[in-house]
Amino acid sequence: MKRWVSLAVFAVATGVVTAFATPANAQDAAKGAVVFRACRACHTVGPAARNKAGPMLNGVVGRKAASVPGFEYSKAMEDAAAKGLVWNEANLKAYLESPDTFLPRGVMAFAGVKDSAKLNDLISYLKTQK
């Protein structure tokens, strides 16, 4: 029993407990809303969402690529959609990290989100936008 108490005191004192309480890839939708501010120049979400320079992003997580009615997609995006691209979390992460790498000849004028925590938060936020 003394050994467990000693380990618990050590864990609290050194901060090891937080490593178990918070997963390494924890996502925070509220922080993601802040990250999304950079996207608002071209994209919208929410009840009044509409297409702008980019498509509206309600329901993007799990949606087939190039499928928003009324939006004119690039040839590269249409080709990717024809090959079955779906915006699951892994594909969104790869695309939003480096759009030009994920989709060569795409037209999204965005350098990408290089910070993985911010990227995870952004995806978490997008998941809340139905």
Image (cartoon, rainbow, N blue to C red):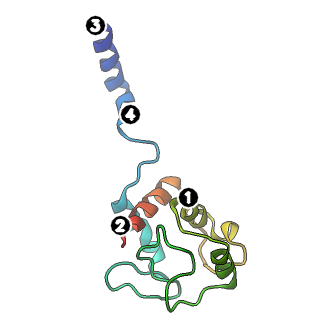
Assign a secondary structure to mark 2.
helix
Marks 2, 3: nearer the viewer: 2
Residue that appears at 57% across and 59% down: 114
Q: How many numbered marks have been drawn onto this rendered protein structure?
A: 4
Question: Of the residues under marks 4 and 3, which one precedes in the sequence?
Answer: 3
Name the amino acid type tagged 4: Phe
Question: Badges 1 and 3: C-beta atoms under 8 Å apart?
Answer: no
Residue that appears at 28% across and 7% down: 2
Mark 1 neighbour density, 10 Å: few (under 14) some (14–19) many (20 or more): few
Where residue 59 sits, quadrant-wise, is: bottom left
**77 left or right of 55?**
right
Mark 3 neighbour density, 10 Å: few (under 14) some (14–19) many (20 or more): few
Marks 2, 4: nearer the viewer: 2
Marks 1, 3: nearer the viewer: 1
Q: Which residue matches tag 1?
A: 90
Question: Badges 4 and 3: C-beta atoms under 8 Å apart?
Answer: no
Name the amino acid type tagged 2: Thr
Q: Which residue matches tag 3?
A: 2
Q: Spatial distance from mark 2 to mark 1, Cα to Cα?
A: 17 Å
Q: Spatial distance from mark 1 to mark 4, Cα to Cα?
A: 24 Å
Name the amino acid type tagged 3: Lys
Mark 4 neighbour density, 10 Å: few (under 14) some (14–19) many (20 or more): few
Assign a secondary structure to mark 4.
helix
* Residue 8 position (above or below residue 111): above
Q: Nearer the viewer, residue 45 or 79?
A: 79
| Res. 20 mark | 4
